[in-house]
Amino acid sequence: MESLLLIWYGRSSRDLPWRRTKDPYAILVSEVMLQQTQVDRVVPRYLAWLERWPTCEALAAASPAEVIREWQGLGYNRRALALHRAAQAIAADGWPDDLTELPGVGPYTAAAIRSFALGEDVLPRDVNVERVLRRTGHRFGSAAAQALMDLGATICLARVPRCARCPLADRCPSRGTRDEPARKQGRFEGSFRQRRAAALRAVASAPRSLADIDPEAVAALARDGLVVVDGGLVRLPA
DNA sequence: TTCCAGCGCG
DNA sequence: CGCGCCGGAA
């Protein structure tokens, strides 16, 4: 079964920039960006990020404000600050044995770095991988990691699986089944999310007076350490 | 509306 | 373990 998957992957793999490197820092950047964010949206931002900060040391030397600006629009902005602190920790002390000691690095991202950058025999389990494992009832080795992700992202979709094009469909007990819909989310237009994003854009372009900015949005950003408030002004961290 | 290579907190 | 976190595009 795994060989069928790998044959399919040989023909259908996605050409993604972070698959062209084994630099642990580059893999770390890609994985943090990819946490709950679509591949197509990450690609250009990943390339720009690495061009600006090619190493942990370069990123560590940047200011939080620069980091937030470079991250702007990707969402989950605290990821950016965590990545920054991780780079500073690595620049100071090197890579820890337990990668989950790094801020913003959990079980999945740690396994991804160990597998994709360090070549260790571990299988990173994201939702796509878990879904394929669950549906097929099969066990796969770490060599199938990228293939499982691509299958889950392009064929074995949660809601509308494309079983007709799946290399594993013949022996898949879940062939044709669909997953339940996930949580619901309100409209973006006019939402608090939109106001918060606008507030961050405003502060990022230049420091503003508190009076010029939506107070609730500023409070939310401040709670996350994305802005500081002083002297009636909101601005990004020094 | 629903999707998205998770993490960290209670 | 459940939940909130982000933003936009399809």
Image (cartoon, coloured by chain):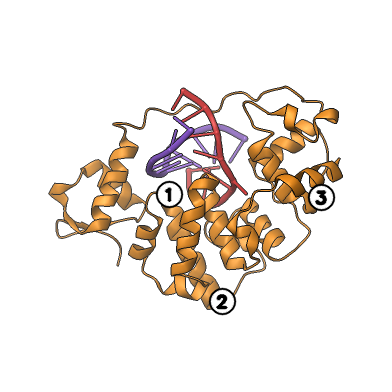
Chain colours: A orange, B red, C purple
Residue found at x 36% / y 69%: A63
Q: Crowdedness of circle 3 by 10 Å Cα count: few (<14), some, many (20+)?
A: few
Chain of the residue under the numbered disc 3 shown in the image: A
Which residue is the extreme one toward the front? A11
Question: Who is closer to the viewer here, A149 or A138?
Answer: A149
Amino acid type, mark 2? Asp
Label whose residue precedes the other's in the sequence (2 or 3): 2
Which numbered marker is on residue A74? Answer: 1
Label whose residue precedes the other's in the sequence (1 or 3): 1
Residue found at x 67% / y 38%: A152
Check chain identity for marks 1 and 2: say if they share one.
yes
Q: Is residue A84 left or right of residue A140?
A: left
Q: Is residue A218 visible from the viewing direction of this image?
A: yes
Q: Crowdedness of circle 2 by 10 Å Cα count: few (<14), some, many (20+)?
A: few
Q: Quadrant of residue A120?
A: bottom right
Residue found at x 49% / y 61%: A47
Which numbered marker is on residue A93? Answer: 2
Q: Which residue was labeled with disc 3?
A: A141
Query: Which x, y percent locates residue A173?
Result: 82, 26
Q: Is residue A130 left or right of residue A237?
A: right
**Label 1 secondary element:** loop
Query: Which x, y percent locates residue A235?
Result: 24, 59
Q: Is residue A32 left or right of residue A202?
A: right
Q: Crowdedness of circle 1 by 10 Å Cα count: few (<14), some, many (20+)?
A: some
Chain of the residue under the numbered disc 1 shown in the image: A
Amino acid type, mark 1? Leu
Amino acid type, mark 3? Gly
Label whose residue precedes the other's in the sequence (1 or 2): 1
